[in-house]
Amino acid sequence: MNDFYPYIKSLHLIFVITWFAGLFYIPRLFIYHIEAYDKPNPDKDILSQQFKLMTKRLWFIITWPSAILTTITAIILLIMFPAWLQQPWMHIKLGFVVLLYAYHLKSHQIYNQLQNDIVKWTSHQMRIWNEGSTMILFAVIFLVIVKDATNWIYGVLGLFLLAILLMLGIRLYKRIRQKNPNA
């Protein structure tokens, strides 16, 4: 069974990457979709229909299948190496995976709302939402590579610093867009 480990791990990483690709891109499409509602018709209707199609394809052809295949390959890896479940770093990683699924499911709710022409978020709020998956990715990658779940001080400080830098970047981009709407 361990002969299959490199293949299962490779598949797991590929599916993680494609899942995150979907989670990184879907909020961008949401932003553009939300901004399309500010345009006059017929542009508003044309853009809205196009973004609905693009998000549907991304969500159901790439993002959801990748999430499911990531989970399946993760379960296989945990069956192959049950001792990982005794490791503190794995407990924390699985906590972040639960958080990632919560992010995914909330994104699905936003997807459904926009598909039904319900806009509850501003494009600025969606830009902030867009950074959620980035934060989770950073946390999981560092945790998996370092495997040190006991040194919370550096991890928490690092995540806060990353969050601050991301928020400053969003604010800077907002200012640039206000000065030049085509940026």
Image: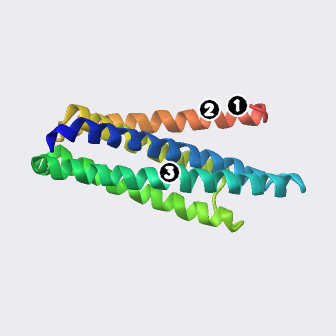
| Residue 141, position as x, y percentages in the image | 32, 36
State the residue at coordinates (62%, 57%): 56
- Residue type at mark 3: give it: Thr
List the residue tagged with mark 2: 172
Q: How many marks?
A: 3
Do callouts 2 and 1 mark residues in contact (Cβ within 8 Å)? yes
Circle 2 or circle 3, nearest the eye: 3
List the residue tagged with mark 1: 176
Mark 2 crowd level (few <14, some 14–19, many ≥20, 10 Å Cα): few
Q: Is residue 169 left or right of residue 76?
A: right
Quadrant in the picture for residue 44: bottom right
Label 3: which secondary element? helix
User: Which of the pair 108/39 is nearer the observer?
Assistant: 108
| Residue 6, position as x, y percentages in the image | 24, 35
- Residue type at mark 2: give it: Leu
State the residue at coordinates (64%, 33%): 173
| Residue 10, position as x, y percentages in the image | 32, 36
Q: Is residue 150 visible?
A: no
User: Which of the pair 5/173 is nearer the observer?
Assistant: 5
User: Which of the pair 14/118 is nearer the observer?
Assistant: 14
Do callouts 3 and 1 mark residues in contact (Cβ within 8 Å)? no
- Residue 130's place in the image compared with 64, above or below, is above
